[in-house]
Image (tube, grey):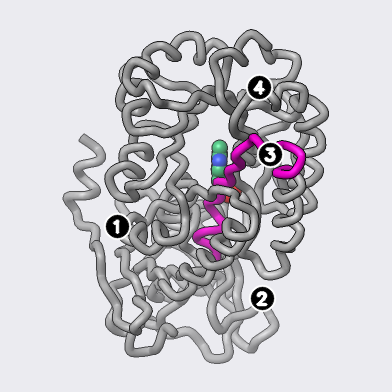
Amino acid sequence: MITPDILAALPSPCWLLEEDKLEKNLQILKHIKDSTGVKILLALKGYALWHSFDLIGKYLDGCCASGVHEAMLSDREFGKETHTYSPAYKEQDIAVIAFISKHIIFNSIEQLNRFLSKAKEANSDISIGLRVNPEYSKAPKEIYNPCAPYSRLGITIDNFDESALEFIDGLHLHALCEESADALKTVLEIFEEKFGKYLDQIKWVNFGGGHHITKLGYDTQKLISIIKHFNSKYPHLEVYLEPGEAVGWECGVLVATVLDIVHNGIDIAILDTSAEAHMPDTIIMPYRAEVRGAREAGIKPHTYRLTGNTCLAGDIMGDYSFDEPLQVGDKIIFEDQMHYSMVKATTFNGIPLPSIATLQKDGSVDIIRKFRYKDFKDRLG
Ligand SMILES: *Cc1c(COP(=O)(O)O)cnc(C)c1O
């Protein structure tokens, strides 16, 4: 639990991982593994807090990486299976990626042809896959829909070249974003309709990410039965899932401090964090982060617009109401800030990145990292 003492001792702003909650997510994922034999990889794109990899590695099989840096992080800090998929590889990265990856997944037949022999040369055991586009998705927003018209992600059935089957071991599909087990069922039916004829020629299928497995109300039993059904239909296929969000779901917060309160028609609190720089999905997705102890505007007696400390006019987290008036120095706790926050954060406007800390299972706090002027300067030259 995040007590007032813990809050007072934290630097601000600060991401605080709650290890016990992370472990709960991992236990749910492990249950799915144990019930089905599926392998589960952490998608580093969504969650890459490598100080927690020792814990995650006790439960999951490895990581999926989107390029050379994530592949290196997986190899060096996670140390289990590394599966790499990139929309397009660069010549200079292929040897390193192949050397440290168990699977390498290509996004087009052209990339497969260009880099196959180079990948095999670097790692004769490497397993080769192709990403396909089932052209069906239930993603909530167009920006998160890899199967939208004109998508560059994955090969459509019309563009699939059967002669490539000779060189590959697996197919990869990633079509979901924050979706239910029912959505996976539908995507798989369509995948099988289109690509099912090839499944007896390969060894594995990767169902990608976007499964909201650890969210309250997700039907894990249904997911288990979908995977079991697939296993019984294709007993020779190894199945992979690669969730990111479901690993980092609701297992940590961003703590910030009220720096000033100004009035212009409404009460506006300026915090020492930023929606734009530290919580970009609140603007891009967009979504509204929950704030501990607060409700929507007007529900509790004191309403404020919570805003960031940059010069971007739209640097706004949203309007929230509180029981007591906010004071300069008060702490604001944004819930569920572990996934797609740290990995996306920037130093826009020179705003310092939040510190990183973990609340360990024994209740102690480990302050892992503080960011300084040098971190800001070094990334600009
Ligand atoms: C984004 C992504 C994931 C993880 O998705 P989540 O929504 O975080 O579970 C997995 N695989 C691929 C290829 C992705 O692009």
Q: Which residue is mark 1?
A: 352
Cα separation, mark 4 vs mark 3, equals 13 Å
Residue 108 is drawn in which quadrant? top right
Q: Which residue is mark 3?
A: 235
Q: CB at mark 2 closer than 8 A to ligand 1?
A: no
* On-image quarter of the N terminus: bottom left
Cα separation, mark 3 vs mark 1, equals 51 Å
Element marked by disc 1: loop
Q: Is residue 233 left or right of residue 95?
A: right
Identify the residue at horizontal 60%, vertical 75% (top origin): 320
Q: Which residue is mark 2?
A: 296
Q: Are marks 4 and 1 in contact (CB under 8 Å)?
A: no
The amino acid pointed to by label 4 is Gln
Closer to the camera, 45 or 172? Answer: 172
* On-image quarter of the C terminus: top left
User: Is residue 245 one of those drawn in magenta?
Assistant: yes
Q: On the rendering, which quadrant does ligand 1 occupy?
A: top right
The amino acid pointed to by label 1 is Pro
The amino acid pointed to by label 3 is Pro
For disc 4, the neighbor class at 10 Å (few under 14, some 14 to 19, many from 20) is some
For disc 1, the neighbor class at 10 Å (few under 14, some 14 to 19, many from 20) is many
